[in-house]
Amino acid sequence: MDTTNNSLPTGTPINDIECERTVLATLMSSYQSVIDTDNILDADCFHVTKHQEIWTAIHDVYKSGDTPDMVLVSAKLAANGSQFSNRDVMEICLGSAICLDLTQHALRLKELNLRRRMWEIGMNLASHSNNEVYSIEEVHNETKSKIDNIFEGLGNRYETLTESYRQLQERMLLNRELKDGQTLGTPTGFPILDSNGGLNGSDLIIVGAETSQGKTSFATALVVEAIKHGDGVAFYSMEMMPWQLAARIASMQSGIVSSRIMYNKLDIQEIYTIDASMEGIGMDKLYFDGRSTSSLESILMSIRQMKMKYGIKGAVIDYLQLVNVVGSKLNREQAVAHCARELKNVAKELNIWIIAISQLSRNNSSPIPTMSRLRDSGQIEEAADNIYLIYRPKENNRYPEPFQDMPTKGTAMITVVKGRNVGKTEFICGFKAENTLFYPLDEDKITQLKANFSFAPDPQDSLKEELPF
């Protein structure tokens, strides 16, 4: 008599349809919620087939760098050949609750998915255990393998020192292959900075100076070198239009004053000169987002989209004190510190470098810039990996040691007051005021500058000569 039972145990896998609808509706109404749950959700987290296809469409739109709203998701569903239409999407968006914190709901769907997978394993185990076709060893091995696969998937975000050191070994080998002057990071054009790795992914770099010292110009010099190298950069200016920044770059490249480029009638030869100077610098690698505003949330969203769409290696924020934290009750210092931390977080998340320009508070008695003078500093210095400070003294002043004999006309001092992985350093670079151009100085150029410059006499010297002792 055959006593085997080949039928599967009956039952409905656990699910929460209303939670699925809430999650989908929230994802299509809040871009930030997509970011927050990107490493939690996948299509299997949704039990209903329609919901799986809608989530896939949301994810596809997000990965393309666009905001997955109802219109774009409906279009993506049609492009994917789905049987579900914009009416299904609209019904979910308009007929479901929206939650402020989606993470807990996403984690619930993740857990329910794990329970369904365990349920399927249990059903399979019950069926095979009730059928002598399969040996005990086969049933055990298959069941154990499936359970292990579930929990291996949950552990992908962890790594041991072994994996981390393997990555370090690869970097050390790549460093050995570099030629003199090359760097694994984005080159800056300034040898001292490049010898310390240039601009590296995950780093937040603060460029600080007093008003009219050239903060934006120095950051722009770094950007131009980056796009020449082929690295994409996103630039967010709270003060200038993209065409005005383009005029600055054209001035830096051509030697023609930017105000003439923007507002005066140029002769044809000057136009040819400007056009020729802009060729070959990788203009298609510098991006501006006309839709972004000065709000922190808008900037962070745009940076993520730029990374997904264009694979940018870095971003510039000009400048930190003008970024708004919408809806926040933080005071100005707390808001700026919050901006710095969020920029650092997104730099690490996307593995890009971010330059944030910052004002320095004035100190007439001691004009040499220091880290403590970062305006609304709060925790800027804690969030930053590197801090570059710019100093251009008046021509009758001198640089501090060890540069006290360096000419101040046509030069600037760059001080790295914080270098998380590279230490502190300082150097003198060239500066052409008429083109707001910062550039590296070699020994020959330094000698030439010294020959054409003399310090103004100190008024105290004549007084000293009249003193008897």
Image (cartoon, rainbow, N blue to C red):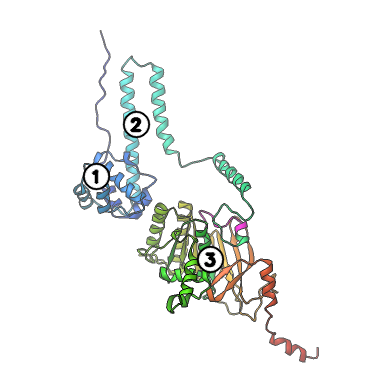
Residue 291, how many percent across, how many down? 35, 63
Residue 34, how many percent across, how many down? 34, 51
Mark 3 and mark 1 in contact (Cβ < 8 Å)?
A: no
Mark 1 or mark 3: whose residue is earlier in sequence: 1
**Distance from Cα at disc 2 to Cα at disc 1:** 22 Å
Q: Which residue is mark 3?
A: 221
Q: Quadrant of residue 5?
A: top left
Residue 70, how many percent across, how many down? 25, 53
Residue 351 magenta-highlighted: no
Q: Which residue is mark 2?
A: 118
Residue drawn at x 43%, y 75% is 262
Instruction: Please indicate whether residue 95 sits to the left or right of residue 395 in the image.
Output: left
Residue drawn at x 30%, y 21% is 127
Residue 202 magenta-highlighted: yes
- Is 7 in front, or is 442? 442
Mark 2 or mark 1: whose residue is earlier in sequence: 1
Q: Which mark is residue 203?
A: none
Q: Which residues are magenta?
A: 194-203
**Distance from Cα at disc 1 to Cα at disc 3:** 53 Å
Mark 3 or mark 2: whose residue is earlier in sequence: 2
| Three-letter amino acid code of the residue under disc 1 | Glu
Q: Which residue is mark 1?
A: 18
- Is 135 in front, or is 244? 244
* Number of residues whose C-alpha sits closer than 10 Å to that of mark 2, classed few (under 14), some (14–19) or many (20 or more): some
**Distance from Cα at disc 3 to Cα at disc 2:** 57 Å
| Three-letter amino acid code of the residue under disc 2 | Met
| Three-letter amino acid code of the residue under disc 3 | Ala
Q: Is residue 131 above or below residue 95?
A: above
Instruction: Please indicate whether residue 44 sits to the left or right of residue 420 in the image.
Output: left
Tell me the SS state at disc 1: helix
Tell me the SS state at disc 2: helix
